[in-house]
Amino acid sequence: MINKSKAISRKLISIIVAAMIVMAVAIAAVIAISGYANLESITRQNIDRSVNVIAERIVSLSARSHSIINSINQLSEIQNLLSIEAVLGPHYHEVGNESALIDAADQIYKLQAQLELAGQLRPIMEAREAFSLALYHTDSFNSQTAKEPAFALRLTSEALEVAQYTKKNRTSLIASTILKGNSDTNLFDVSSIYELGLSDFLASMSAENLLAVPEAPGANARGKIDRLIIVNNKPIIQTAAFLSISVPHPDDWVMTKTNAYIVVIEQQVDESLISKFKELVNADIALLVEGELLTSTLGVEAFSYDKKLKVAVTNEEFFVATKKVAFSAGMDDLREMEVLVLSPTSLVAALNLKLFIQIFMVILCGTFLVCYLFYIAITRIINTPLSALMEGVEHLAQGELVHKINIEGDDEMGRLAQAFNQMSADVHEKRHQLAISHAELERLLEAQKKELESTQTQLIEAEKMSSLGELVAGVSHEISTPIGICITAESFFNGETRIIQAKFNDGSMSRQDFTDYMAIALENSSILSASLSRTAVLVKNFKQIAVDQCIEDVRPIIVYRYIEDLLSTLKPRMKALKHKVIISGDEDLEITSFPGAIAQIITNLIMNSIIHGFDGIDEGCISIEIAKHEHGVKLIYKDDGKGMSTQAQEKIFDPFFTTKKGKGGTGLGMNIVHKLITGTLHGYIECTSQPDQGIKFEIFIEGLKL
């Protein structure tokens, strides 16, 4: 054992000496040969990352504009104001009525809508730091003779530019500029409209005439266009898109979704923005378009740039990283902006010298320290305590945890021996505690298992309530249509009644007037009756389905009619899709069961087909076949979707299994179906499917007795 300890000592000393020699030689070689190259490489990597960051920030400017457009499309208040402003615009007129005069009151109402619209849009622009936002009327209802877009308004951080028209054409333009602090949307009331004219209101807001208005850039009906334009030698990211809003058609007053506006949002890349970029990456920045320097943080108007060496020269030399960002220049052409991030080469040279001096001093100090430690090590007697330690390790390896090493002294070896003895005792104690902890862990795992089962039950109930919530939202949306028709019909009939009453009171009512009024009354009565009947059917179906899902009650149902009623409540969620649901089989089959559970099963199966089976399929077909089977009913559910693999079929009823993990799927839908069928309804369910051949579920539901 002593010979072994001596061999270890010799090896240890040899390794220390060899390692110090190799380390000293390696560090000296690295510093002498590649110090500057490594620092240059690090610098270039940093500016490469920085140029990517700056390019992403510039590209994100167009994403901000897209966000503004999305906010406009989502906010109902802005949509309503746009609809009002469009109706009062120059391109909104009946066929053949292109040069009709626009009433003075309508001009004032248009101005009020513009001011309110500016008030809604300004916070959105400021949140996205947009430079300007402009709207242009389009001639969307006259596709055969569509005219050029007409300027509506332009909003900046300082002012609002608005356009008024005296006729239904773009040549009758009256443009004005209103400063931000002077616009007031509370100027108008019924009396002021008839007492004051448009010019009076503009004068009250200190509006100035606008001699020229910007022309509308081209837009694409398929999406947004991001352009790079140069204005006063400043790059501007311009985003143009159509705004689709609901406007009453000028010929029949039917609300029509149409591209009524072109919206143009500009994001300016100016000195303040690139100064922020400089603070972000701690390097100078320059922007070039077609080789011409537009702006930079260098304070120079030009510099030489070697693209091959990636070096730029002004009054000093810089390392350069570049990245090109492409935008549209017109409808089809592209224009690239070249982003340059520059770092002075002198900074790398100074850092290299400083680093060399520091490392040299560390190596020098380390060498003296190692020599001293080496001297201490060889003067001490380490073989005996090392042998005792090795003997103790061998005993420990053989399982003798109570073996004690006797080394006297308070030096490193003595403390190591004490630590070893303490470790042996601790291991012995820990082994005993481990046995106790193992038993406790098994008890905790059993408790956790019960808690997880309870949590799963709560999640299933939450899934059922979520489905009911979606049902409420869908039916509410569906009911809003006939209710809206009733309100419109009542309002129209009220107006006609007031007109005929006025004629009756002044004695000018003719027989023809009364005949027309009666025809209108009968027509409105028919509309109200049909709409209210539709509403009653929806409410009745929803009420029954909702009660069934909330209250687990047993009652007799006619299966075919119950599924039909259920599908009517699902119609709002399927209205925008082209999928079909076909019911066939025994239309009079009646069973006594839990209708709420049946509704939950059919709903989950249909939504599972739409979300998973018809993913990427525009027109799918679902069939539900109803047949009597022994003492219950047999349902055969099929769809012609994507189907699934054998591995997926084996897990389809497992809790939390989903093919949409991370995309909103909970994995509880089919688990709920299985639990309801096999538990609540005392039946069974079987699944067969192959990839690209749809899926088939055979379901048996046992009839119960009241």
Image: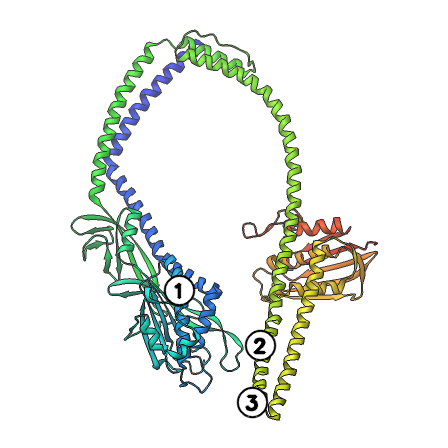
- Image quarter for residue 43? top left
Spot occupied by residue 317 in the image (x, y as percentages of width and height):
19, 48
Mark 2 to mark 3 CA distance (whole Å): 23 Å
Q: Residue furthest left?
A: 315
Spot occupied by residue 636 in the image (x, y as percentages of width and height):
73, 60
Q: Nearer the viewer, mark 2 or mark 3?
A: 3
Residue type at the position of mark 2:
Ser
Q: Which residue is mark 3?
A: 506
- Image quarter for residue 147? bottom left
Residue type at the position of mark 3:
Asp
The local crowd at label 3, few if under 14, some if 14 to 19, many if 20 or more residues have their Cα within 10 Å, is: few
Residue type at the position of mark 1:
Gly
**Front-lying residue, 674 or 393:** 674
**Front-lying residue, 505 or 485:** 505
Work out whether 490 lies above or below 466. Answer: below
Work out whether 342 lies above or below 145. Answer: above
Mark 3 residue element = helix
Mark 1 residue element = helix
Which dot marks residue 578?
none
Mark 1 to mark 3 CA distance (whole Å): 46 Å
Spot occupied by residue 377 in the image (x, y as percentages of width and height):
33, 13
Which dot marks residue 491?
2
Which dot marks residue 119?
1
Answer with mark 2 or mark 3, whichever residue precedes in sequence. 2
Mark 2 residue element = helix
Q: Nearer the viewer, mark 1 or mark 3?
A: 3
**Front-lying residue, 443 or 25:** 443
**Front-lying residue, 84 or 311:** 84
- Residue 643: tell me if it is visible: no
User: Could you tell me which residue is drawn at 21 percent across and 54 percent down?
Assistant: 305
